[in-house]
Amino acid sequence: MPANTTLFSPINLGPHTLPNRMAMAPMTRNRAGEGNVPQPVNAEYYAQRTSAGLIITEATQISPQGVGYPATPGIHSTAQVAGWKLVTDAVHAKGGRIFLQLWHVGRISHPSLQPNGATPVAPSAIKPSGQVYTYQGMQDYVTPRALTLSELPGIIEDYRTAAQNALAAGFDGVEIHGANGYLLDQFLRDGSNQRTDAYGGSLANRARLMLEVTGAVSAVWGANRVGIRLSPLQPFNDMRDSNPEATFGYAVGQLNRFGLAYLHVTEMGMEKPGAAGSAFDLGKLRTIWQGVYMTNSGYDLARASAALGANKADMVSFGVLFLANPDLPARFAKGAALNTPDQATFYGGNEKGYTDYPFMS
Ligand code: PHB
C-alpha cells in the first residue's frame, strides 16, 4: 500500500475503481415488502449512501430455506430480482457501486419462517441457545436437522442461482456471507459442526462447503467481483471454535487461491488487546491474505485512519455510522459532527430512522 494512504485514497477492487476506502457494512434493516421483495424506500436508502466507496447490502437470502428473520430480502424470486433492480438502478444513477450479500441462515431460523413449517437445517443437529424473532414474537430456537451429504450439492446450486439472479439484478459484485454464525460459518467452526463425513472433522472438511460455494459463485461472477466476510471471534448466534487461529488461518489461506475482490473481516468478539484469555491476533489474517483486506467493527474516523496508516487494512466498513449518516465520507472529510443513531428504529418500521437521517446542511 502506498505511503500516506488515507480513507480518501482510491482503491482498485477487481475491475472497479473505488473513489475512497470507506464501505457501507451489510446491515439487516427488516424493511423488505411482502414476499421479502425490496421496495422503493429501500432503493432510496441505498441511493442516499452512494458516496461510500462500496455499498454492501444487507444480508439477502439465497433460497426460502435460507430465511431466518421477518422482512429480510431474498434474491431467489423474480419479484425480488425486480425489486433489487430498483435499488441498483438508483445507486448507479447517483454514481455508486453496490455488492449484494448472499446469505443462508442455517440453524438461525424457526419452522414458522421456513417453507411448509420445515425444521431449519444445519451441519449438525445442535440447537443454538437463545431465541429467534418471528412474526409471532420471540420463540426458542429449535434443534435443527443435519443436512445430508446428498443435499449439499443443492445448497451450492442455490448459491449459484442466487449469484446469477444478483447479476441479473444489476449488482456490481457479491459478498458471500461466511460470518456471524450463519450456515457457512456453522460448517466452518467446530462448535456447530460435528459431522463425520467429508464436511466435518478436519479443517479441510469444515471449510469445504465455504470453498465450494466460493467456487460456484466465482464461476458466475468472476472471482474478482466476489468478496467474502468472516467473523473469526464472533460469539453471536452461540458460536465457538476450539482453535480460531488454526481454523481461520486455514480458511483464509485456501480462499487466496480464488483471487477474490476482497476479504471482509469483522472483529466482533475480539478481546481488548492484552485482556486475559485474549484470542489470537486477527492481524495474522491480514498477513496471510493476498488481496484487499477490509476490516470492520466499531471503527470511527480516528481508528479507521490509524488502521490504514499502519497498513492493518486496505479498507474499513462502517455499519451504524453509515446507517445514521448518509453522507458519512463528507462528514469525515470535514471532521463534522455525526447524527445520533436511533436504536429503536434499526430493525423494522418505515422511513423513520431509515431514510430520514439528515445530510449535512
Ligand atoms: C441480524 O439480522 O441480526 C443479522 C444478520 C446478519 C448478520 C448479523 C446479524 O451478519
Image: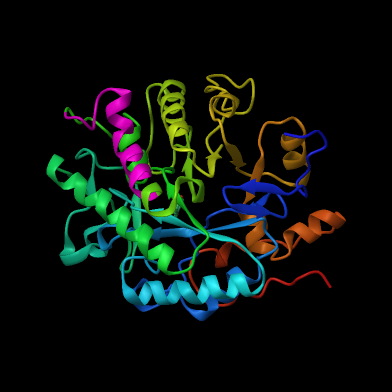
Q: Reply above or below: 250 against 224.
A: above
Q: Quadrant of the C terminus?
A: bottom right
Give the camera-side residue of 122 and 63. Answer: 63
- Residue in the image at 50% along x and 77% along y: 86
- Residue in the image at 54% along x and 27% along y: 285
Is residue 42 visible in the rendered image? The answer is: no
Secondary structure of the magenta portion, mostly? helix
- Left or right, 342 with reference to 175: right
Q: Position of residue 169 (x, y in %)?
A: 44, 69
Among all residues in the image, which is located at the extreme right? 334
Q: Position of residue 148 (x, y in %)?
A: 14, 42
Residue 311 found in image quarter: top right
Q: Is residue 209 magenta?
A: yes
What is the tally of numbered marks visible in this picture? 0
- Left or right, 224 with reference to 132: right
- Residue in the image at 53% along x and 22% along y: 280
Give the camera-side residue of 135 and 179. Answer: 179
- Residue range in magenta is 197-217
- Residue in the image at 33% along x and 75% along y: 78
- Left or right, 194 with reference to 325: left
Q: Position of residue 355 (x, y in %)?
A: 62, 74
Among all residues in the image, which is located at the extreme bottom? 40
